[in-house]
Image: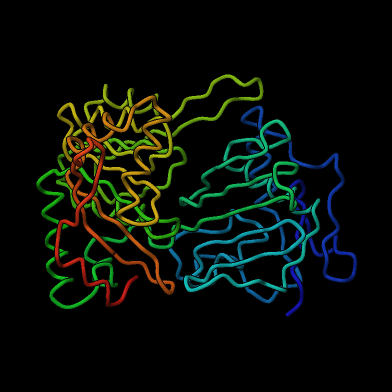
Amino acid sequence: MPFVAVPSFATARSPADADGTGRIVPASADERIAPWDTDDDRAQTDSSLDGVALHGADHGTPALAGNQCDVSALGPLAPFAAEPGVTDLFVNGESGLWVDDGRELRHRNEWEADERQARELAVGLIARGGRHIDEASPCVDVRLAGGIRVHAVLPPVSSTGTLISIRLPRAAGLSLNRLVDAGLCGDGERREALRERLRTTVMRRENLLITGAAGTGKTTLLAALLGEAPAHERIVVIEDVAELHIAHPHVVALEARQPNLEGAGRIGVESLVREALRMRPDRLVVGECRGAEIRELLGALNTGHDGGAGTMHANSLTDVPARLEALGALAGLGPEAVARQTVSAFDLVLHLERRDGLRRLAAVGRFAVGERGTLTVEEADALTDDASGPGW
């Protein structure tokens, strides 16, 4: 398979621009995309990206190809993203492209890009998401159309060249039934018992914390559970970068904003949680707790806002209390305060794991205050002791 050339994101290229080897000639430095300053700039950037051509590859036309989202916004990465089963793509500077096909990471030898081209790709993708990346703001996270999440890091913060990480919402929009049938809860009696348990949890308006490592399906499960909420309820979602796609008729979403070039205008998740409380939510949802916003979420769930939920990174169910204490410390909360607030706020913890490329519900737990006044978590259902069976 011929190698894939990386075109500049500044100007649409045609086959006539190639240098005779199938490689697209990069644009000059003057042609590179600058951060969007006006609506006209935004439109011009969109136009240039839409015109990007990819030569020398036999992947076919970037399209849905049976996947859940339109990947055409990814430009030269679109053919790789359109392959069945792909969940993540990673550009590691000049070291190449790695693709996660849902089973394992694979290095793609047909991709080739130098550092300049990798940087142009990062700048273009971030600009298309409405943000800017440069030496002053070298680490940026954006959401593209369809819920595609793009994270980029520029040197010198990255010592290995420009880094681009892309997460594709392959399972976005899946219902709880489809996730369970795909193996979320294992199989046999355990599967049917947990299916009913999860549905009942939503209908009883229990507050949920979904935990797991990166790529275990926390956002996917949260969206599926919220899709089970009664249609008359108002769901207010707060996220750092919008990823949740909830099949529900009344969902409003708030997304954090990074500072502008002058360092002003930041609106953090913690501020949005306070704003959301004024919007009369029936269910308050924080897409991912990763900082001081845990204080606002715990406070909200302790003041009569039932049916709320959030996600958090944790390696195992037993690691969740320590993770919450660490986040609480960022908000100025001591371990005892975190314990009392958490036990009152969350009714259930759902921990997901990914093993051999399959995602499953590994454990269900409940929080408790230990003898020393610190937070502990206990297994809530004997059915979760059996971690065998398939996943999704």
317 or 3: nearer the eye?
A: 317
273 or 318: nearer the eye?
A: 318
Q: Position of residue 162 (x, y in %)?
A: 72, 50
> Which residue of the protein is positioned furthest toward the bottom in this rendering?
1
Q: Position of residue 187 (x, y in %)?
A: 21, 76
Q: Is residue 104 left or right of residue 14?
A: left
Q: Position of residue 274 (x, y in %)?
A: 32, 23
Q: Is residue 179 left or right of residue 199?
A: right
In the image, residue 181 above or below residue 36? below
Q: Residue at x 45, y 37 (%)?
A: 240
Look at the image and tell me in which quarter the C terminus lies. bottom left
Q: Position of residue 289 (x, y in %)?
A: 38, 39
Q: How is the image coloured?
A: rainbow
Look at the image and tell me in which quarter the N terminus lies. bottom right
Q: Residue at x 43, y 62 (%)?
A: 170
Label count reads: 0
319 or 92: nearer the eye?
A: 319
Q: Residue at x 54, y 59 (%)?
A: 71
In the image, residue 220 above or below residue 256? below
12 or 365: nearer the eye?
A: 365
